[in-house]
Amino acid sequence: EVWGEASGDDEVEGGNDNIVTSFEEIEGKPMYNAILSKLINVLKPTSIQLTDNSAQHAGHAGSKGWEESGESHFALEVVAEAFEGLNLVKRHQLIYMLLGEVMPKIHALEISAKSPSEV
């Protein structure tokens, strides 16, 4: 299920890039809300989209996800200045570190992390 894209209206000082500052929380999707909240607050992305693919993986090992909500499989597309100069591994490590206590509850996280100059 694609739950939409977060968006922001604030302009960065000295540039025209819009920074995503908020997203619409989805009731009954605590992992989705926690992931977006943490990444938006720290990375200050110009674009971020999180897709919950858990329903496509129901029934196989590791698909249980967060017991309360069944969330387990996500695809993340994020564009942020923070990724400038970082290689792919470092970008993924940064995301894993930011998600901290949420990461062990995620069975699969597909990541596309780019800097604004790459889009």
Image: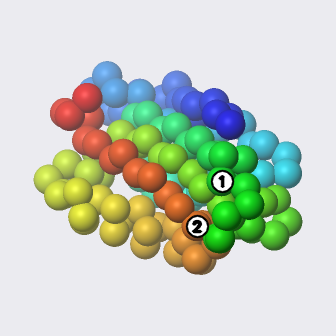
* Marking on residue 2: none
Mark 1 element type: helix
Q: Position of residue 62 (x, y in %)?
A: 64, 70
Circles 1, 2 touching at the beta carbon (< 8 Å):
yes
Front disc: 1 or 2: 1
Report the Cα–Cα distance between label 1 and label 2.
10 Å
Q: Position of residue 78 (x, y in %)?
A: 41, 42
Residue at coordinates 64% horizontally, 34% vertically from top-left? 2
Can you see residue 71? Answer: no
Amino acid type at circle 2 is His
- In this rendering, is residue 82 above or below 24? below
- Asked whether 31 or 98 is in front, the reply is 31
Q: Position of residue 104 (x, y in %)?
A: 58, 77
In the image, 67: left or right of 48?
Answer: right
Q: Quadrant of the N terminus?
A: top right
Q: Which residue is mark 2?
A: 107
In the image, 54: left or right of 42?
Answer: right
- Asked whether 49 or 67 is in front, the reply is 67
Q: Which quadrant of the structure image shows residue 4? A: top right
Give the residue at the far left of this rendering: 85
Say how the picture is coloured.
Answer: rainbow
Residue at coordinates 82% horizontally, 59% vertically from top-left? 69
Q: Which residue is mark 1?
A: 57
Q: Position of residue 64 (x, y in %)?
A: 74, 67
In the image, 118: left or right of 80?
Answer: left
Can you see residue 81? Answer: yes
Give the residue at the far front of this rendering: 60
Amino acid type at circle 1 is His
